[in-house]
Image (spheres, rainbow, N blue to C red):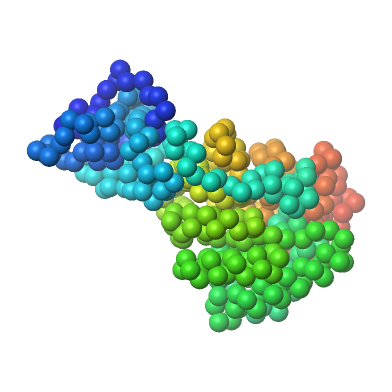
Amino acid sequence: MRYIDYLDFRYRPGDDLICRFWLKAKDPKKAAGAVAAESSIGTWTETTTVKPYMLKYAAKVFRLEKQGKGWIADIAYPADLWEAGNLPGLLSGIAGNIFGMKEVDKLRLIDVRFPKKLLKTFPGPKFGIQGVRKRTGVRKRPLIGTIVKPKIGLKPDDHARVAFEAWVGGCDLVKDDENLVDQKFNRFRERLEKTLKAKERAERETGERKFYMVNVTAETQEMLKRARLAEELGNEYIMADVIVLGWSAIQTLRNQDFNLILHAHRAGHAALDREEHGIKMCVIAKLVRLAGFDQLHVGTVVGKMFEGLEDVKENIKALKEDMGRIKPVMPVSSGGLHPGHVPRLLEIFGRDVIIQMGGGIHGHPGGTRAGARAARQALEASLQGIPLKEARKSYEELDQALKHWA
Ligand code: CAP
Ligand code: MG
């Protein structure tokens, strides 16, 4: 088959895997055919070894339409082309060689629809949105979290102290930063044990449940050991940096079926999803959901990272849209946020969201506890529909935060 033979505009997909690409090319038809060939059964030239029985596995370009400076190409793949439950295998097809081909000047995987036949071979989240709410006891409102800052460098005692202050001030969740793992200045086990003690103290002091998302990111066997320790110590959560860990490692982590809520940090995603060549975050979100994490960072619109409203809405949709038995994933909004952003975040996300503030809590002029109070005050006011300019009159910490940042 030549590249052009992979085009079939009469084809109507059944329970196929469907990929939507956006591409720029001198010859868009040939380029779309090249993408379909290279990501299914073909290569740059016809080969003498093709057998008639295997032609049914050829991908089909069934739609090619101009969009902006490029083209939208919809490509259907037979479900049987893919190994059950194998994310790396899937990605080496639909997100592998094709990005390097000369036929395309730019190529972006912008959406994927999974066939039911393949969906049922992945676990999906153990908890999902409802399970997170049930396990944390935070049934309706958004959860407030913080990231211990400075992001790395603190000793375990100081890490635990910052966590305690944030929990007592009103945070539900405290997480490690994405690049805090098991450095000599802050060993994983010591940090975990001391921060869990701080958590128990904060729970006693506030009468509220508190949660610690310890970062288990590491070589796979070591990561599993750390996750096992967190579970043995009775923790409810772990966090992992899913992009730098890779698809195989996150499947391994999920497939242990730990009794732990899995929080996906996405550090590194912007190397893939920021420009017009790569994989959009909404596709990454669906893959993390298939692999089975319960929570995932999806941007803020108003904070320090690049995503706009359309991007974030697409990411939220990817986590919540109907994917059969695969549970919806709790969106996490984080990155450059402070209490003044809360009303807008509720408009964008609704109530199913975890709002995380790092600098926006620990940079409060009154310190961490005051920063956490201000975050909680902003949430409580916003949930009652009270504008922050009113609420600040009765909440000193919120007033200070707004003066400092907004
Ligand atoms: C936020 C954060 C998170 C970002 C990641 C940071 O801290 O801890 O890693 O939210 O970005 O290190 O920047 P601040 P995203 O609250 O101090 O910004 O959520 O977009 O993946
Ligand atoms: Mg961080």
Against 39, is 402 above or below?
below
Q: Toward which corner of the image does residue 353 lie, by quadrant?
A: top right
Residue 62 visible in the snapshot? yes
State the residue lying farthest toward the top: 10
- The residue at the far left in this view is 48
* Left or right: 250 in relation to 59: right
State how many labels appear.
Answer: 0
403 vs 80: above or below = below
Identify the residue at horizontal 38%, vertical 24% (top origin): 13
Quadrant in which the N terminus is drawn? top left
Relative horizontal placement of residue 3, taking residue 67 as reference (left or right): left
Q: In percent of the image, x 38 and y 34: which residue is there?
A: 79
Q: In the image, is 227 to the left or to the right of 382? A: left
Instruction: Find residue 144 and report its horizontal and vertical position in percent.
Output: 73, 53
Q: Position of residue 136 (x, y in %)?
A: 75, 53
Most distant residue in the bottom direction: 184
Residue that appears at 21% across and 31% down: 53
Q: Check the image and report above or below for 253 versus 378.
A: below
Q: Position of residue 330 (x, y in %)?
A: 64, 46
Can residue 302 be seen by looking at this rendering? no
Q: Front-most of 405 and 4?
A: 4
Residue that appears at 40% across and 24% down: 14
Residue closest to the eye, 251 or 403:
251
Q: Residue furthest right?
A: 394
Q: Position of residue 226 (x, y in %)?
A: 57, 69
